[in-house]
Amino acid sequence: MALEKLGDQLRGSLQRLFKATHIDAKLIDHITADIKKSLISADVNIELANKITEIIKRRALAEKSSKLLTAREHTVNIVYDELVKLLGDEAGKINTEKKPTKIYLLGLFGSGKTTTAGKLAKFYKKQGLKVALVQTDTWRPAAFEQLKQLAEKINVPFYGIKDEKDPIKILKKFELDFDRFNVVILDTAGRDALNNELIGELKAIKEAFRPDESLLVLSGDIGQTAFKQASTFKEAVGVTGVIITKLDGTAKGGGALCACSATGALVKFIGLGEHIEDLEEYKPKNFVSRLLGMGDLETLLKKAEEVIDKDTAEELGKKFLKAEFSLTDVYKQMESVKKMGPLSQVIGMIPGMANAIPKDMLNLQEEKMTGWKFIMDSMTQKEKDNPDIIKASRLSRIAKGSGKSEADVRELVKQYYQMKKVMKQVGNPKQLKKIEKLMNMRGLKGLPGF
Ligand code: GDP
Ligand code: MG
């Protein structure tokens, strides 16, 4: 999950709130001080961190909670509210009705432009749009191949001229072809810093390409420096939005997100990993609710709808909700969930689940999943339906048949029971009502569990 450390710390502060017998000024002082410390350690600018803690404090003490919320819920809500404001306004979807919608990516070396170009191509292709990728990074010799390979992987057309040094020539050559596509994504060269050479080049490309969106790609690990980068790029070249990458691997991502918001630049997407699927439209509300461990059913359901066939989901979902599932069901569900992204990311979106399963276990599980298919293939239907019967002789037969060790087979059975236990916990009536309500709303009745 993104901003793991910040999330852990903020959830810690809220836990304190939940555990307290009553809420008074002293407690609020403690909690807001905690929150401030967490924000500063995520490289959020000190003034911004000060400001938000003062506001939370003032609101928590001044506002009366409504009838519908307990005092605790009310305070949590204020924290949530203010964090959402700090982390930015929602940019809204990029309008792709115009044909072609031209998206121009710019930024410094290594910010993640080329990777993000590929991710965006995949993102729009999944929506059924015709997408093309264009390379005008003539600065780095490897850039041509890098994007070409990504294009092949996603199976979208690629435009570029190997060894051509002039980006404008590349654009002019293919310009007329672009009209065939819904979305044309343009990758550009970076530099170590925004110097005059880069500004000149980016302006010339902009003039020749006439983009609908100019998106600045920033790496999350620059933290609050993002403020300066976003402002200078905005001023020098003009940008319509920002994409922040590498939020999976840095403690400073919170600082970067807040800094962009402070410049008024809207963050449109966030990058959450090196894989082509690790891109999300940025929605501060969903983001903060996940960060605080409140889950993010909307995002999860949207992903689930994309990858899980509805009937399977419905049938499996019922079994999972009641914690009545066999190993065959686990396998089917695993396959679906795998398509949704890394397990840890998926689990983080289920309310209350962000902390329920240790991350190590999730990572382990993810690796193990590959081996599980072999093991399950060597089981009889009876064994899959009722793993209880797998004792010594069956164990050794399955191990031999699958080419795995007996320990591996035992582990699978153990994990299965562990999952059952977790599902029983998640499946408490209150949680279920909420999940079912949302699913009914979307006509999707299965819980995309795991
Ligand atoms: P460019 O120079 O701006 O084109 O940057 P690249 O797209 O070549 O990316 C630079 C490095 O960052 C590569 O190793 C990418 O795999 C990595 N990268 C890009 N986006 C992400 C992300 O969201 N998460 C992680 N962990 N790595 C990323
Ligand atoms: Mg590049």
Image (cartoon, grey):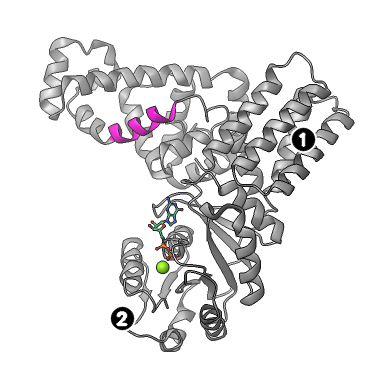
Overall secondary structure of the magenta stretch? helix
Q: Quadrant of residue 158?
A: bottom left
Q: Nearer the viewer, residue 140 or 115?
A: 140
> Is residue 366 in view from this perspective?
yes
404 relative position to 261: left or right: left
**Residue 274, percent across and down?**
40, 52
**Rendered residue at 28%/19% (across/down):** 413
Instruction: Residue at 85% x, 27% y: name it.
Output: 65
Residue where numbered disc 1 is placed:
78
Up-down: is 232 above or below 206? Answer: above
Q: N-terminal of the two: label 1 or label 2?
A: 1
Residue drawn at point x = 24 percent, y = 18 percent: 410
Marks 1/2: CA–CA distance: 54 Å
Identify which residue, 107 or 409, lies in the foreground: 107
Q: Secondary structure at mark 2?
A: loop
The answer to whether 392 appears left or right of 95 in the picture is: left
Range drawn in magenta: 358-369
